[in-house]
Image: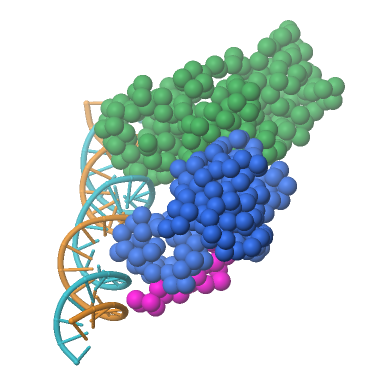
Chain colours: A green, B blue, C orange, D cyan
Amino acid sequence: MYTESIENYLKTIYEIQKESEKVTTNSISEKLGVAPASVTSMMKKLSEKKLITHKRYQGVKLTGPGKKIALEVIRHHRLVELYLAEALGVPWDQVHDEAEKWEHVLSEDLEDRMDKVLGYPTRDPHGSPIPSRDGTVIELESIPLVELQPGQSGVIAEVSDHDPDLLRYVGKMGLYPMTKIEVLSVEPFSGPITIKVEDASHILGSEAAQYVFVSDVEGERGEAS
Amino acid sequence: MYTESIENYLKTIYEIQKESEKVTTNSISEKLGVAPASVTSMMKKLSEKKLITHKRYQGVKLTGPGKKIALEVIRHHRLVELYLAEALGVPWDQVHDEAEKWEHVLSEDLEDRMDKVLGYPTRDPHGSPIPSRDGTVIELESIPLVELQPGQSGVIAEVSDHDPDLLRYVGKMGLYPMTKIEVLSVEPFSGPITIKVEDASHILGSEAAQYVFVSDVEGERGEAS
DNA sequence: ATCAATTTTTAGCCTTGCCTAAAAATAGTG
DNA sequence: CACTATTTTTAGGCAAGGCTAAAAATTGAT
């Protein structure tokens, strides 16, 4: 078993790796809220344990075993998020913070029981994939809502869970995963976007629209507003 | 918020206080599995925080605030135990160990949600009282099964959860809280006890019978076997 | 290509919570 | 009442995981 701290570092490295190519000391420091020097010393420890490879000044990379642990933690996190939402009715903007604590104390037995109760789900409440037990992750093909053109439609695939305020904001207009939407208009210069959700139209700021991802996009591109 | 370690010390002190009058350094050390010296230094810290009173060489006592925290931890523990048993089907001999971890990461919000889902319960799966939010504990009047005489009957009130093997053992004969039993015979010299549970008779070792508590005892005492 | 800015690492320190070994206080016994 | 056994405390250390300040390596810009 690894410490909570190690689990958090590995999870964080995995998450950065997924979107940034290079995983730097600074990016880990920032995402984890610790000093860069603390990151360096932890990287040394993780290297010794063969959980990452680390070339000085060159960033880090998860090894096979390191990635496996990261995915286990993420699986716990997302399974717990969904469980809290489904079984205990926790609002989707709160499940993340709770899961941050629970992910480290969930036994394999309880993981299985939750998995079963939930019917072996594949997505968490924000639409992120729940890694399977053996470490398989099925990412959904999707693009940020902000890139859609008027007339295009699609299905909400995923919403970033990094900010509870954002989740409450987009939740109020019903932008949950699996919801069908259509872009009605887009104001120029990063202006607001008008979308149709369940026969109601809503106006969405472009910044928020960067964190909402859409799949199954259909319709012509390039129409002006 | 207090550390997990502090919460565990307070909980342990409360539990010892309930059955031993004097709470000694050694008893805490033993129950918590740490060296006596570690206990002494923690007692110093808890005294400074006004969570206990401590006279050197004289044992410790919880203060009002210390007791409050101890009861909150115990409430979390027992609520989680019951939740795991009811909602996730975890066997009663396993809930304790899981709850040991969960009790420290349960938010007030989730505590409330579990409480509600369970219908505001008052007993955990072993029959121990779940302290109310404001710190009230309703102890059940009960005596160890080993003290019953042939012909006496009663209702299982509580079973000690200190040993999973014991729980599995008595669970196999259906000795769960709220179960009616009747003592048929008691062999002398701490010999086995024959009891009737749900129209079946079982033989129970006297050691196990020390950890099973019975309430609502009825019937004549003192008959020989 | 050199110098400045940025990033990363090293060095040294702190807190928490545990440990062992030794000293001090208390309790029990002849 | 004195002496021994037990209990508790003190003293000194250790590992984890943070921190700050300073040094070193890299990057970027003129």
* Identity of the residue drawn at 33% across and 28% down: A51
Residue farthest to the top? A220
Q: How many marks?
A: 0
Asked if residue D6 is positioned above or below residue B132 in the image, the reply reads below
* Identity of the residue drawn at 46% across and 28% down: A72
Asked if residue C26 is positioned above or below residue B166 in the image, the reply reads below
* Identity of the residue drawn at 35% across and 77% down: B56
Residue C8: horizontal and vertical position, in percent? 32, 35
Q: Magenta part of the protein: which range?
A: B50-72
Residue farthest to the front? B224
| Residue A155 is inside the magenta segment | no
* Identity of the residue drawn at 63% across and 50% down: B181
Q: Left of A43 or right of it: where is B120? A: right
Residue A200: horizontal and vertical position, in percent? 84, 25
Is residue A11 visible from the viewing direction of this image?
A: yes
Q: Quadrant of residue A84?
A: top right
Residue farthest to the right? A199
